[in-house]
Image (cartoon, rainbow, N blue to C red):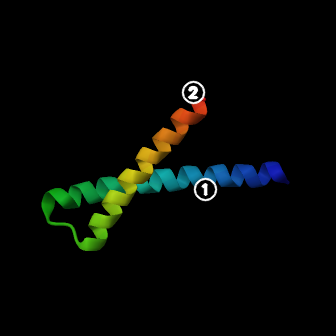
Amino acid sequence: MTTLAEMLQIISFVILIISSGFYFRHLEQCRREKKLSMFERSMYISIQFAFFWLAVSLLFTVFV
């Protein structure tokens, strides 16, 4: 049962990463066309931070 829960957690994590990547691309396209709203700007910045911390955590798990 633990293995199933871990697999579901990994699948949901991957889906979150992929969907946030697509939303980030959408926000970049909107940013080129028009000025982003306050909410869009905050999402744009928070997704950048999330991807940065994801990369840092993956580097820590690989090299430490």
Q: Residue furthest top?
A: 63
For the point 48% across and 39% down, the residue is 56
Which label belongs to residue 27? none
For the point 85% across and 54% down, the residue is 1
Query: What residue would you read off at disc 2?
Result: 63
For the point 49% across and 45% down, the residue is 54
Q: Residue furthest right?
A: 1
Q: Residue furthest front?
A: 64
Find numbered disc 2 in the image and state the secondary structure of the residue it sits on: helix
Find numbered disc 1 in the image and state the secondary structure of the residue it sits on: helix
Relative image position of residue 46 (x, y in whole percent): 38, 59
Q: In which quarter of the image is residue 52?
A: top left
Q: Is residue 17 visible to us here?
A: yes
Relative image position of residue 19 (x, y in whole percent): 45, 56
Q: Could you tell me the amino acid type at mark 1?
A: Ser
Q: Considering depth in this image, is 23 or 44 the residue closer to the camera?
A: 44
Q: Identify whether 1 is placed above or below 34.
A: above
Query: What residue would you read off at disc 1?
Result: 12
